[in-house]
Image (cartoon, helix red, strand yellow):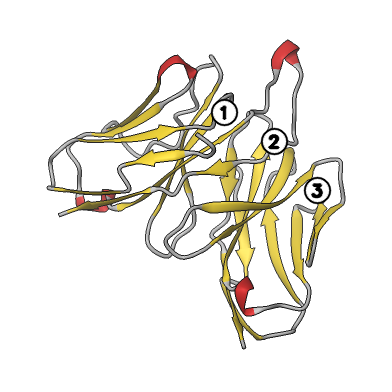
Amino acid sequence: GAGVSQSPSNKVTEKGKDVELRCDPISGHTALYWYRQSLGQGLEFLIYFQGNSAPDKSGLPSDRFSAERTGGSVSTLTIQRTQQEDSAVYLCASSLGLFTGGGRISTNEKLFFGSGTQLSVL
Amino acid sequence: KQEVTQIPAALSVPEGENLVLNCSFTDSAIYNLQWFRQDPGKGLTSLLLIQSSQREQTSGRLNASLDKSSGRSTLYIAASQPGDSATYLCAVLSNTGKLIFGQGTTLQVKP
């Protein structure tokens, strides 16, 4: 597709259930980010994938959160045993990435965001 | 640990005013700084990207500056319009590829 696609756009779940959020990045983008945005707050970094490198998971708030990126394209963010404090908008973004082929670094790659998934845990 | 701060948190101005939004960061080892716009209930749109070797970037009525050594950036909006009302976020890209955001400045431009 032309942009970053996230699904579902809205998810309502009960406390204790597991949820999966999906992100389809722009084709060819090697970098993929997940962020969380609570009401009226800024973006909280969760996880970052860059090509085939090990992901930077330093922002995941607990071991209930995990993410995968299959085949260097689609990514899934999974939240197990959801809690009410997990309620937020989960945003995915992609870019051509910092580390291009041949060991070159590109610092001019803009980030493109999806519209987000609004998660509500009751 | 990189921290990004934006001041003010909220700003209300009459239409036609020029205004400045501020962004500061604690670690100057960045590759670039980006300014984004977020409309209510929507994702973010990239406005300007300044590479660490650059001092400023301009797009239409927007001008962003970067002083890496002092850890500061400003976004200047000229002749503000009601359509400029949105939340503006800055983000810095670290040398590991991690992009860290500030909390944003919510701007309201009154007709």
For the point 62% across and 63% down, the residue is B6
Secondary element at image label 2: loop
User: What is the chain identity of the residue bearing mark 1?
Assistant: A
Quadrant in which the C terminus of chain A appears: bottom left
**Label 3 environment density (alpha carbons within 10 Å; few <14, some 14–19, many ≥20):** many
Secondary element at image label 3: loop
Judging by the rendered image, the residue that carries numbered circle 1 is A31
Question: Which-is-in-front pick, marks 3 and 1?
Answer: 1
Task: Answer whether labels 2 and 1 touch (C-beta < 8 Å).
Answer: yes
For the point 26% across and 52% down, the residue is A85
- x and y percent of residue B17 in the render? 74, 83
Mark sitting earlier along the chain (2/1) = 1
Asked if badges 3 and 1 are on one and the same chain, I answer no
Does residue B57 appear left or right of residue A26 in this picture? right
- x and y percent of residue A48 in the render? 50, 31
Judging by the rendered image, the residue that carries numbered circle 3 is B68
**Label 1 environment density (alpha carbons within 10 Å; few <14, some 14–19, many ≥20):** many
In this rendering, is residue A110 above or below B75? above
